Image (tube, grey):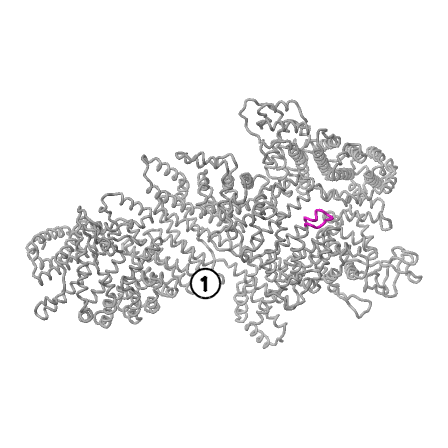
């Protein structure tokens, strides 16, 4: 608007020409609470604009030359403001200036603002600009006047309530003291005399006239407030001036009358006259005169502002008025007459004799002759006051004071039998009806103003019930409000007599002086059949009706309410509808305003205060039931105008009575069939729900429809509204009958569909009907779940009736532009527009309710869903309308409804087939920009701001981000931003600049608005945490959909301090200054929701950066490297700058105590018993309600609740425990019957009360009844799903609907019922339910935060391992240790809450699972520093948890919890084993710690053994037991426990289940450990282990091993999961091997033959496969393919070969069985073994040698752990033998090299090098080499066994049988193994000569030394048997190597004894070397 100018051509004008727009200030004033001080911002605006509020419209100046000249410059300076002048706007401003006679500069401001408000561009200025600007101009003027009026309204409140200390009151007094009164009078006179500009056309002139008249009325409104509330005293001079103006108005001497050119203008003129008349009457201060008369104060001593002379001058003006010439003058004349009469009535008349001479009676006669009194009634009957936005109560108060003064002045009483009395009563009725404040004053005895009216009322009551209509009519008007209605009821109820006409006789008069009479016979009361005045009753004659008939007031007190009810009951037979209507009107208003009156009518009149009502005959009595009377009346009403009026009142009475006694009213209503429902005639035509399935039963008779049409066409639609309201009440109470169904369908299919086409007498009533029927529709959709019988039919109608949909769409489907145009249309007045807005808002709510209700259970895609998503919906598509209505700022409720509707439509369930973008929605760029601008304006919180609207908008954005990312992206990205992106596409060296383009754009940005909200996090945290939750929820949704919002996220992250603002709530929650307890009560859960959102966002961001950097690494490796590395430098800097702030923040968390505080805040949890307590409280209420219902007292309970309680009571009474109690009570002397059952229920309630107070129920039958009620889920009907989607990682939350339960209870009514004694129980139940809801929200919010923290920690840990660019800090061990201890305590506390198991433990188990998961992370993250006390604590806590959970019924949540507890045990045992083996802890602490750990582990074994039975925990449990057993040095420690608790038979049977090979593998591993123990082997044999393994092996294929086939399958299909191929064959053989070894030769002899047959014979092909050696690579390529089939092997397969050989070695020792069974296979086994040994022997690789050819063995990493080993450094570090060769074949398979960034790099690196034979050694390659040497060891062992057996046989027979001597390896093979062993040992010992070798190296040295010894042994056998002598060259080489070995092993003690063995065998093989002292 006002911008800084850069031009030198600047002109200055008067600063007072500038003003800030007043519409926003007015809205703030109207929204400000009148009961509190104004905000400081408003106070400042009040002071700054004081001159404008004082001068009002006069501040808009006429044209002047200086302003005209200023517009010729390029810039105009107005005080501190500057305007840049645009030529086209200047031309428009000059045109406006001449038209409106307005200053040129102010005209320019108006033009500019008009275009801004309408989003118009400069190019849009055309000839139609005039109307637009004129509207804007007058809107500003009127807003200014309304601001002044609102200031006075605020000041009046503070002046009466707060003692006058308010700033707004001071401002108002300042306005008055500065002369506001006179300025307004001058402005008003100027407006009256203004002439219209001649150049205006007709339309513009009409607009000008109407706006001018509006200003006239606003000025008069302000003047009325000034005088009415005595802010300023109206003196005589001012009064005469006003009176002169009024005279001019009524006589037409002003131009004012010329403005009456339209209906609105005529109405405005009439209103101005009335308002000025009221000002004049109020200025007479009649109230003060009445006070003076009441207090007997003389004229001169009173506070009258007029002197005698003033009154005479004023009288001269009044006397000049002629009531006959102008009827508007008559009321003023009459008021003046009353004024004079009151003055003349003051004491001391002689002092003001001049005034008493004025003939006030002449004025009265003139006024009455001119019917001036009727003018007041005309004012009250017109819409002038009712629909003005002025001080309505003040206007009526003025009229009330005048009428009261008139009655007092001229002693108006019942003697006036003319129409004037009726007129006065009508005026009084109009004054009091609708004004509660005036009614309260009337019934206040201290109110002297109403005294004359009260006297008139008492006179009317004196003739009751003779004069009934007038009395009842006045009482009906006086009962506005709760207390006034009670006063009216008491006034009637405490009537002291009855008045009836009676024929007088000479002997009737008892006392002629006092006119008392006495009746000698019972006297029937006329018009009240059955009511009789007893004989001998006395009465006073009030007046004579005729000569012989008198009206007598009998001294017979009878309630007037009773008389009215009786007359109402008997009016069915009388033709007096007027009396019937007024009685119904009174009853209707009484029950509407007062609950007490409702109960008085229902309770008291059921027995007439315990009095019997005589019906003429003493033997006949009647009972009066208000409900039955009304229902009977409704049933018999005819379709007429009066019938419709009475119907509306009757139905309203039933609706209000329904609230008090739902059951009674429902029974009478259903029985009476009020609306003539066409009940089904076919008894078999009934649906499954108990309601009629045929459409005929839904139909009502035509009477109701006819009456509705009559009601609308000839009345105010009150009947229609009442019927709809009654239908809504029926739904709320849960009544499900055909009648209710008929009313519902009638409302939907008739009223809703047709009401817009009806003719309305009262135009605005149309929107009332629309609103009410939409409320019924909304109630229908929300009641479907509560009313299952009705729900099925109603749901079908609402989903499939297209006429209902069309009507709803016609209401809702419009645009903001269309609504805005209504304000300038002459066809719509303000009330119509407001009604339409309310209907649209309600219609939007209905659509949202329908979508949410029918979202899940709707079969297929109903018509409703098709229509709501269809682009062909008329008048416009629903989504298009909703998007447009977001921009309709005049009504925030419409915006909220539109936002909620869009959120519902964007839900994925519905819109999964409708992915919306701006293109698919048919939106152009302008519409998208408008939507974006509207969202930004809403989020900017510019006044007037609406928190609900902001929250709804944030939820809309969240829904779009999750379900419609394309649409949200279109909204976020503007055209200007897209252009900026194109311009900056090449700015590769300015990443920060390009990323800030959107945020720095001139166009309003959605992201800017979001960031502005985020900057207010601190304020929102304290003031509105729910809004902050929604904001962070939206940001989380953006990060969840990161692939669709990458640009958006980048723009957010580069904003200043973004991560600090996001994480502010974390800092506040974990700091000492800002604890969660600062959030009071219900808002506590918001803190954890904030925490959850923040942690989720951080976790997603870390994950996103990790993936982006991974992708960038792959791209950088694949693409060609840059020449100078410039691109990589820029990219790395860009990435670093984006993550720097997050890095620093997380680093700060880890360095400080914040992380520990955060973990402790999230993991802490206390078990809440509120849910259980709520159920007990509900049971207590239910039992007490059962007792009440048995006494036929249903109270105010809803029908549905009564049905549930009755059903529960019937089930309870049928229980065996209840029958047992009946027997017990009968034996005690109680009689069987309903009373006994009630007694038992009463006793049960006392027991339940004790349970609620903490006392357990000891009596078994009562305990069983209590448990039945506890399990009955009585409150399930009131469970509802929470709608807010703010906890993404938590399941749906179900809360108790306490609002609906409270409504079903009708608790507000209980104080007036016999249920009052149970009210405390019901309130306790509601409080418990509310507390349970609160605790549920808090618990789930904390669970969500805990899961978010766990995710963040795991993401951070992953980055520590793979992405050190984000942060190089780990969580400090001391923090982890502290958190472990705290988490264990919390976990233990959670476990204790599960004992005994609560009814609903799933939520607790969720908490338990999350705590265990966090603890597991902490344990794994502490590296090797887990202390033994912590380890013991974890083991005990986990064991306690496992033991507890084993008692629970298996479920997913229980299984998950057990899984984490088992994993905790595994991790703890692993760390404890690691500490003990490594010797980290030593001394006494080590002994004590290890002992305690061992004891804890032993205690866990029975529990974990029990977990084995659970299929879900089988594998993990068995692995845990296996790990624990390995930690004990002696099996005797644990064997007894295992023998007792292990379900061994179950384990063995598990081997038969090969569907899950992992289970079989784990089982075999455990059985392997068990088989290594002697008694364990016996257990296995007894359990049938041999049969199970044989069965397991029977499924293996003959062509290849099971593990190999399994490996290939898994590797090819699920490599990404890195599932481990299970070596079942090898494990099975290992178990058999251990079994044989444990049993010993004697015990194992019985199974050897069987094993040899099953394994070596039957599975010979499989054994042969594992013993087959691949061919060593040669230079030729002819056998390359065949060789690859075997040379490509896995590490698992090598282990399988090792296990196969181990079993062969064990079996070979049993020579007799071996010879017997394997005689034909023995030679083949030896040949296979020798070939394999030869393959291993050829690995003679030495340091420095280059292997020429292919790798001898390809062993690619396959499993996840193998990939990890591949990335690790070697741990043996040998360059000899297989340690060198295995590295050649241990490479990544190029086929799968893309799976890892590191593997990709390595593959590309390997491929880029020329020397492919040079490969790095890895941890995996070392493992492969070790496996090769283990196999060599077993092969040698087997061959040695064979050789030893042959040698022993040769000794036995005395010679060597060469023909049968076993095959032995050639010396070259053995030499190769010797060379490898000696070389590797020498290398390792030399490398670590000065220090002790690592355990791994020691083990390999010992293994290789054994291999060397056995190779020498076999070489010795070959030498002895074959006579081959060693080659001399080899001996020399061996000698050198041996010497080097001896020298290298010096100092390595562990090799001392093995070397002796080596030297001993060397002495046999090479005896010549024994001479060398260096060796021996």
The spot of residue 952 in percent (x, y) is 55, 46
Q: State yes or no: residue 1791 in magenta.
A: no
Question: How many dots with numbers?
Answer: 1
Circle 1 packing at 10 Å, graded few (<14), some (14-19), many (20+), is few
**Does residue 1394 appear left or right of residue 1175 in this picture?**
left
Residue 988 position (above or below residue 845): above
Depth check: 1409 or 786 in front? 786
Magenta segment boundaries in residue numbering: 756-767
The spot of residue 692 in percent (x, y) is 63, 64
Quarter in which the N terminus is drawn: top right
The spot of residue 673 in percent (x, y) is 70, 63
**Does residue 1706 appear left or right of residue 1174 in this picture?**
left
Quarter in which the C terminus is drawn: bottom left
Residue 547 position (above or below residue 969): below
Question: Can residue 1134 be seen at all in this image of the molecule?
Answer: yes
The residue that disc 1 covers is 1395
Residue 1366 position (above or below residue 1687): above
């Amino acid at each position: 608007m006002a911008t800084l100018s850069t031009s030198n051509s600047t002109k200055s004008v008067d600063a007072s020409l500038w003003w800030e727009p007043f519409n926003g200030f007015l809205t703030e004033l109207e929204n400000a609470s009148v009961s509190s001080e104004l905000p400081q911002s408003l106070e400042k605006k009040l002071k700054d604009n004081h001159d404008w509020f004082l001068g009002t419209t006069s501040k808009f100046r006429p044209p002047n030359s200086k302003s005209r000249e200023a517009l010729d410059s390029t810039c105009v300076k107005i005080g501190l403001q500057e305007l840049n002048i645009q030529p086209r706007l200047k031309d428009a401003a000059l045109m406006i200036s001449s038209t409106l006679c307005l200053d040129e500069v102010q005209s320019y401001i108006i033009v500019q603002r008009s275009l801004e408000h309408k989003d118009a561009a400069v190019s849009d200025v055309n000839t139609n600009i005039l109307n637009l600007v004129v509207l804007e101009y007058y809107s500003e003027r009127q807003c200014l006047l309304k601001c002044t009026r609102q200031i006075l309204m605020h000041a009046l409140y503070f002046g009466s309530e707060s003692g006058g200390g308010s700033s707004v009151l001071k401002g108002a007094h300042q306005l008055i003291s500065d002369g506001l009164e006179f300025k307004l009078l001058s402005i008003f006179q100027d407006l009256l005399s203004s002439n219209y500009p001649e150049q205006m056309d007709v339309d513009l002139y009409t607009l000008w006239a109407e706006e001018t008249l509006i200003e006239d009325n606003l000025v008069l409104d302000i003047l009325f407030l000034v005088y009415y509330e005595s802010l300023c005293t109206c003196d005589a001079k001012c009064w005469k001036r006003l009176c002169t103006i009024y005279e001019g108005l009524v006589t037409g001497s002003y131009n004012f009358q010329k403005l009456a050119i339209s209906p609105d203008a005529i109405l405005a003129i009439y209103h101005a006259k009335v308002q000025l008349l009221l000002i004049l009457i109020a200025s007479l201060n009649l109230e003060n005169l009445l006070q003076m008369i009441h207090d007997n104060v003389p004229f001169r001593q009173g506070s009258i502002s007029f002197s005698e002379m003033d009154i005479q001058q004023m009288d001269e003006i009044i006397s000049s008025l002629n009531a006959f010439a102008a009827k508007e003058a008559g009321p003023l004349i009459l008021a003046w007459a009353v004024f004079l009469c009151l003055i003349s009535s003051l004491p001391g008349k002689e002092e003001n004799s001049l005034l008493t001479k004025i003939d006030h009676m002449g004025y009265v006669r003139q006024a009455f002759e001119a019917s001036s009194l009727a003018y007041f009634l005309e004012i009250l009957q017109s819409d002038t006051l009712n629909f003005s936005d002025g001080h309505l109560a003040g206007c009526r108060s003025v009229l009330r004071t005048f009428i009261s003064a008139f009655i007092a002045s001229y002693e108006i009483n019942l003697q006036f039998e003319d129409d004037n009395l009726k007129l006065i009563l009508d005026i009084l009725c109009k004054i009091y009806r609708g004004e509660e404040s005036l009614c309260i004053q009337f019934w206040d005895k201290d109110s002297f103003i109403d005294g004359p009216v009260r006297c008139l009322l008492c006179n009317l009551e004196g003739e009751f019930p003779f004069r009934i209509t007038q009395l009842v009519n006045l009482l009906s008007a006086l009962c506005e409000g709760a207390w006034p209605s009670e006063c009216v009821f008491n006034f009637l109820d405490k009537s002291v007599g009855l008045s009836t006409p009676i024929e007088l006789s000479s002997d009737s008069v008892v006392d002629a002086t006092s006119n008392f009479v006495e009746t000698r016979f019972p006297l029937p009361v006329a018009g009240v059949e059955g009511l009789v005045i007893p004989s001998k009753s006395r009465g006073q004659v009030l007046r004579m009706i005729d000569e012989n008939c008198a009206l007598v007031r009998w001294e017979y007190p009878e309630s007037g309410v009773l008389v009215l009810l009786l007359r109402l009951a008997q009016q069915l037979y009388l033709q007096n509808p007027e009396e019937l209507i007024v009685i119904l009107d009174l009853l209707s208003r009484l029950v509407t305003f007062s609950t007490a009156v409702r109960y008085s009518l229902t309770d008291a009149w059921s027995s007439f205060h315990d009095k019997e009502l005589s019906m003429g005959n003493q033997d006949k009595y009647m009972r009066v039931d208000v409900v039955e009377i009304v229902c009977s009346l409704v049933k018999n009403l005819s379709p007429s105008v009066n019938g419709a009026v009475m119907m509306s009142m009757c139905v309203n009475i039933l609706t209000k009575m329904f609230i008090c006694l739902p059951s009674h009213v429902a029974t009478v209503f259903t029985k009476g069939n009020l609306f003539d429902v066409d009940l089904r005639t076919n008894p078999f035509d009934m649906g499954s729900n108990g309601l009629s399935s045929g459409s005929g039963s839904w139909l009502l008779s035509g009477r109701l429809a006819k009456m509705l049409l009559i009601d609308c066409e000839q009345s105010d639609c009150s009947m229609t509204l009442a019927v709809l309201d009654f239908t809504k009440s029926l739904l709320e109470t849960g009544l499900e009958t055909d009648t209710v169904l008929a009313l519902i369908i009638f409302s939907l299919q008739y009223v809703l569909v047709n009401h817009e086409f009806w003719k309305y007498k009262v135009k605005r009533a149309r929107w009332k009907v629309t609103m009410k029927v939409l409320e019924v529709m909304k109630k229908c959709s929300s009641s479907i779940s509560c009313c299952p019988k009705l729900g099925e039919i109603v749901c079908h109608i609402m989903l499939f009736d297209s006429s209902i949909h069309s009507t709803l769409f016609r209401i809702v489907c419009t645009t903001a532009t269309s609504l805005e145009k209504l304000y300038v249309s002459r066809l719509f007045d303000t009330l119509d527009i407001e009604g339409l807005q309310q209907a649209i808002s309600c219609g939007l709510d209905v659509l949202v309710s329908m979508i949410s209700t029918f979202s899940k259970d709707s079969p297929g895609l109903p018509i409703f869903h098709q229509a709501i998503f269809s682009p062909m919906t008329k008048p416009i598509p629903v989504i298009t309308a909703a998007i447009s209505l977001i921009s309709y700022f005049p009504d925030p409720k419409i915006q909220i409804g539109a936002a909620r509707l869009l959120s519902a439509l964007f839900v994925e369930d519905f819109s999964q087939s409708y992915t919306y973008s701006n293109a698919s929605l048919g939106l152009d760029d302008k519409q998208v920009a408008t939507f974006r601008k509207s969202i930004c304006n809403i989020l900017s919180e510019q006044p007037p701001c609406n928190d609900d609207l902001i929250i709804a908008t944030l939820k809309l954005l969240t829904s779009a981000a999750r379900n419609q990312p394309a649409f949200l992206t279109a909204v976020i990205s503007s055209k200007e931003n897209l252009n900026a992106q194109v311009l900056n596409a090449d700015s590769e060296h300015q990443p920060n600049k390009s990323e800030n383009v959107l945020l720095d754009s001139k166009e309003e940005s959605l992201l800017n608005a979001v960031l502005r909200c985020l900057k207010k996090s601190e304020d929102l945290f304290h003031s509105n945490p729910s809004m902050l939750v929604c904001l962070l929820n939206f940001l989380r949704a953006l990060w969840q959909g990161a692939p669709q919002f990458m640009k958006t996220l980048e723009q957010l992250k580069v904003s200043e301090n973004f991560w600090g603002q996001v994480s502010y709530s974390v800092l506040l929650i974990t700091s000492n200054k800002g604890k969660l307890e600062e959030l009071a009560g219900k808002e506590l859960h918001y803190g954890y929701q904030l925490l959850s959102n923040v942690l989720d966002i951080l976790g997603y961001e870390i994950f996103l950066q990790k993936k982006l950097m991974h992708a960038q690494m792959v791209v950088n490796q694949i693409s060609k490297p840059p020449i100078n590395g410039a691109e990589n430098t820029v990219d790395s800097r860009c990435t670093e700058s984006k993550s720097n702030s997050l890095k620093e923040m997380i680093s700060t968390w880890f360095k400080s105590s914040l992380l520990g505080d955060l973990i402790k805040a999230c993991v802490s949890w206390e078990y809440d018993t509120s849910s259980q307590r709520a159920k007990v409280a509900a049971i207590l209420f239910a039992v007490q309600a059962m007792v009440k219902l048995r006494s036929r007292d249903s109270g105010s309970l809803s029908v549905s609740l009564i049905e549930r309680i009755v059903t529960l009571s019937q089930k309870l009474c049928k229980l065996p425990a209840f029958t047992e109690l009946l027997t017990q009570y009968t034996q005690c002397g109680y009689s069987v019957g309903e009373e006994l059952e009630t007694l038992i229920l009463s006793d049960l309630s006392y027991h339940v009360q004790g349970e609620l107070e903490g006392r357990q129920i000891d009596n078994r039958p009562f305990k069983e009844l209590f448990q039945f009620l506890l399990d009955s889920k009585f409150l399930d009907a009131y469970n509802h799903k929470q709608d807010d989607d703010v906890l993404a990682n938590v399941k749906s939350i179900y809360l108790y609907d306490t609002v609906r339960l409270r409504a079903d209870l009708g608790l507000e009514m209980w104080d007036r019922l016999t249920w009052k004694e149970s009210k405390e129980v019901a309130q306790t139940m509601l409080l418990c339910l509310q507390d349970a809801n609160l605790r549920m929200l808090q618990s789930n919010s904390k669970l969500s935060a805990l899961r978010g923290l766990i995710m963040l920690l795991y993401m951070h840990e992953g980055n520590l391992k793979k992405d050190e660019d984000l942060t190089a800090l780990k969580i400090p061990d001391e923090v982890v240790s502290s958190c472990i201890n705290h988490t264990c305590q919390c976990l233990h506390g959670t476990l204790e809450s599960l004992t005994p198991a609560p009814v609903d433990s799933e939520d607790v188990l969720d908490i338990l699972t999350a705590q265990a998961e966090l603890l597991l992370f902490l344990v794994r993250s502490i590296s090797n520093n887990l202390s033994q006390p912590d380890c013991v604590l974890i083991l005990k806590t986990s064991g306690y948890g496992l033991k507890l959970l084993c008692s629970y019924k298996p479920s997913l949540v229980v299984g998950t919890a057990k899984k984490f507890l088992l994993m905790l045990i595994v991790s703890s045992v692993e760390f404890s084993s690691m500490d003990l083996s490594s010797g980290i802890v030593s001394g006494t602490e080590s002994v004590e710690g290890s002992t305690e750990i061992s004891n804890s582990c032993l205690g866990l074994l029975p529990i974990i053994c029990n977990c084995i039975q659970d299929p879900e925990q089988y594998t993990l449990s068995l692995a845990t037991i296996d790990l624990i057993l390995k930690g004990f040095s002696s099996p005797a420690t644990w064997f007894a426990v295992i023998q007792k608790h292990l379900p061994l038979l179950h384990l063995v049977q598990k081997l038969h289940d090969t569907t899950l090979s992992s289970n079989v593998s784990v089982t075999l591993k455990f059985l392997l450990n068990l088989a290594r123990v002697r008694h364990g082997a016996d257990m296995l044999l007894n359990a049938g282990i041999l049969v199970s393994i044989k069965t397991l092996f029977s499924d293996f294929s003959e062509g290849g091993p099971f593990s190999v086939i399994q490996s290939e399958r898994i590797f090819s299909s699920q490599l990404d999961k890195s599932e481990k191929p299970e070596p079942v064959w090898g494990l099975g053989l290992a178990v058999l091997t251990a079994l044989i070894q444990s049993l010993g030769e004697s015990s194992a002899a019985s199974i050897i033959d069987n094993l040899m047959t099953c394994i070596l014979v039957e599975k010979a092909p499989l054994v042969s496969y594992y013993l087959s050696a691949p061919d060593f690579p040669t230079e030729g390529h002819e056998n390359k393919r065949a060789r690859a089939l075997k040379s490509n092997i896995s590490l698992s397969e090598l282990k399988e070969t090792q296990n196969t050989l181990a079993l062969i070695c064990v079996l070979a020792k049993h020579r007799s069985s071996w010879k017997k069974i394997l005689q034909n296979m023995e030679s083949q086994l030896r040949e296979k073994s020798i070939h394999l040994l030869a393959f291993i022997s050829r690995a003679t690789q030495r340091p420095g040698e280059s292997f020429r050819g292919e790798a001898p063995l390809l062993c690619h990493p396959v499993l996840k752990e193998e990939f990890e080993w591949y990335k690790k450094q070697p741990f043996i570090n040998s360059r000899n033998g297989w340690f060198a060769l295995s590295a050649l074949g241990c490479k990544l398979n190029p086929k799968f090299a893309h799976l890892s960034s590191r593997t990709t790099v390595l593959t590309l690196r390997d491929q880029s090098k020329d020397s492919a034979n040079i490969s790095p050694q890895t941890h995996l390659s070392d493992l492969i080499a070790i496996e090769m040497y283990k196999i060599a060891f077993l092969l040698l062992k087997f061959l040695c066994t064979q050789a030893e057996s042959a040698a022993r046989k040769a000794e036995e027979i005395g010679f060597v049988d060469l023909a049968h001597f076993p095959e032995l390896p050639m010396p070259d093979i053995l030499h190769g193994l010797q060379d490898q062993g000696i070389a590797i040992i020498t290398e390792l010992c030399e490398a670590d000569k000065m220090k002790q070798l690592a355990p791994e190296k020691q083990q390999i040295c010992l293994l290789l030394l054994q291999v060397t010894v056995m190779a020498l042994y076999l070489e010795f056998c070959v030498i002895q048997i074959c006579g081959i002598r060693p080659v001399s060259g080899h001996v020399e080489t061996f000698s050198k190597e041996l010497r080097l070995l001896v020298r290298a092993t010096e100092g390595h003690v562990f090799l001392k004894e093995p070397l002796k063995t080596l030297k001993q065998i060397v002495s046999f093989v090479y005896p010549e070397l024994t001479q060398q002292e260096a060796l021996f």
